Amino acid sequence: MKLNDTTSHPTSRMAYAFVGILALATAACSSVGKKNLPSPEEVMAQQRGPVQRGEYRIMVGDKLHVKFPYHHARDQELPVRPDGQISLDVTGEILAEGMTPLELAEVIKERSQKYLKKPEVVVIVTGIGDRRVYVGGEVNRPGFVVVQEGMTPLQAVMAVGGFKDTAQTKDVLYIARGAGGEYNASRVDLDDVTKNGAPEIVRLTGNDIVFVPKTRIANAGVFVKQYIRDILPVESRAGATAPIPIP
């Protein structure tokens, strides 16, 4: 499902997804499903993946300098828009989010061959955008929060005004985008944190989601599938839709 271009509209595709998430809060089931989700530690490990030199992946808000060494008139400096895309004179729209600079350069090179003779392309990340998480559900001011180093789910909830009285704090969903582009979900018990002082394991990074339900969500796998993948397409490095592995 492709959403309309958001060049002239500030709302990103992620924001559209969370409209559906907020609507689900009133329809969540009152019993916990039998299948267990991965532990928060497993989700964090899947998210980070093996870190290798040169594998920085472009994110929304990053500033790019796209250079054509043999066609300098085509050089452009531009940001990655909230919908994850960039627009170049010789290629049109390209989904840049999630690619490495080298991967993006290859896509630009391939698409620009229609207009340029034997193009060469270099993509340089000249600025890093803010890394944001979305906090939704039964919180006082659902919305985006800029991630600070070491930020936990509870800190993110406090940054949007804290829990509503109707919040189900024992079964908060922590949803993270994996190293391969897929989304992974886990439950975190923030009731234990607030009442008993239990330490928080999760440390948030950009693109994470913290969703506080009104009642317990019976099937978190279906929740993530319907309100993350189907409304917010998860684009992989080459632009193909990536799966969401939920046990």
Image: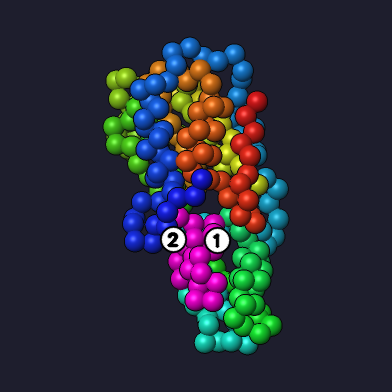
In the picture, the quarter occupied by the C terminus is top right
Residue at 40% x, 27% y: name it: 24
Q: Is residue 181 left or right of residue 63?
A: right
Please give the residue where the numbered disc 1 appears in the rendered image. Answer: 96
Q: What element carries label 2?
A: loop
Residue at 40% x, 35% y: name it: 20
Residue at 40% x, 38% y: name it: 18
Corner quadrant of residue 193? top left
Tell me, yes or no, whether the highlighted magenta stretch contains residue 107. no
Q: Where is residue 33 in the image (x, y as percent from the top left)?
A: 55, 15
Alpha-carbon distance for marks 1 and 2? 9 Å
Corner quadrant of residue 35? top right
Q: Earlier in the sequence, mark 1 or mark 2?
A: 2
Please give the residue where the numbered disc 2 appears in the rendered image. Answer: 81
How many neighbours does mark 2 have within 10 angstroms: few (below 14), some (14-19), or many (20 or more)?
many
Magenta range is 78-97
Q: Position of residue 15 (x, y in %)?
A: 39, 45
Tell me, yes or no, whether the highlighted magenta stretch contains residue 86. yes
Q: How many labels does the image show?
A: 2
- Report if the CB atoms under discs 1 and 2 are less than 8 Å apart: no
Under mark 1, the amino acid is Ala
